[in-house]
Image: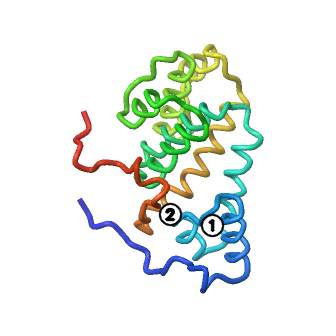
Amino acid sequence: MTAELKVDATPVSDETADGLAKELLDGAREKLGFVPNMYRGMAVNPGLLSTYLHGYAHFREQANFTPPEQEVVFLTISLANGCDYCTAAHSMLAINVSKLSEAHTQALRDGKSLDDEKLEALRRFTHHMWETRGLPTKAEAEAFKSAGYSDIHVLEIILAMAVKTISNYSNHVNHTDVDDAFAPYAVDKTVKAA
């Protein structure tokens, strides 16, 4: 295994933030009550953070997915990309904000099937989209649609994949520390995957 890259850039602090970075970080604090470490790392390039926040807001606010379904999509992608930060963050959001059950959240974290047929179809198709790099088979697309989803949902998964690529990859190269708010949901590296 090769050594992982760590970007040689100091995350943007409240004292060093200016221009667009300051505007975005101040907006995050106003909306969330704190500035996530992930945002500080991405704010080194304000265009990166701005693009992420814009796409994230569209997925959250204008999606045809319910909040629990949104978390199934985000957790599936974050796990597939190996992003421990986003896995922790979306686990907390899934349970406490989006009201995805703890059992479903844990099953996703464990890479297991969900016992809800519709959510499982969503998990399966999202992973298929990730695995095929957006080239789903007709059979998988039809199975997804027969579970109650439509072409607009396929496009929304692509939006989520774009958003998660930005955040997951940024966290990889920034080696982002998990915030205290997400720490109870941190990925346990001592547990071996089945």
Judge left or right: residue 172 versus residue 153.
left
Picture colour scheme: rainbow
* 112, 144: nearer the viewer: 112
Q: Position of residue 134 (x, y in %)?
A: 56, 39
Q: Which residue is mark 1?
A: 48
Quadrant of the image containing the N terminus: bottom left
From this viewpoint, which residue is outermost toward the bottom? 16
Residue shown at 52% from the left, 37% from the top:
95
Q: Looking at the image, which is closer to me, 192 or 95? A: 95
Residue at image mark 2: 170
Residue 115 image offset from top left, x and y in percent: 45, 17
- For label 2, the crowd category at 10 Å Cα-Cα, with few meaning under 14, some 14 to 19 and many 20 or more, is many
Q: Amino acid at mark 1?
A: Leu
Question: Horizontal and vertical percent for residue 84?
Answer: 40, 52
Label disc, if present, on residue 91 of the rendered structure: none
Residue 85 image offset from top left, x and y in percent: 44, 55
In terms of secondary structure, where does tag 2 sit?
helix
Classed neighbour count for the residue bearing mark 1: other residues with Cα under 10 Å, few (<14), some (14–19), many (≥20): some
- Which mark is first along the chain, 1 or 2? 1
Helix, strand or loop at label 1? It is helix
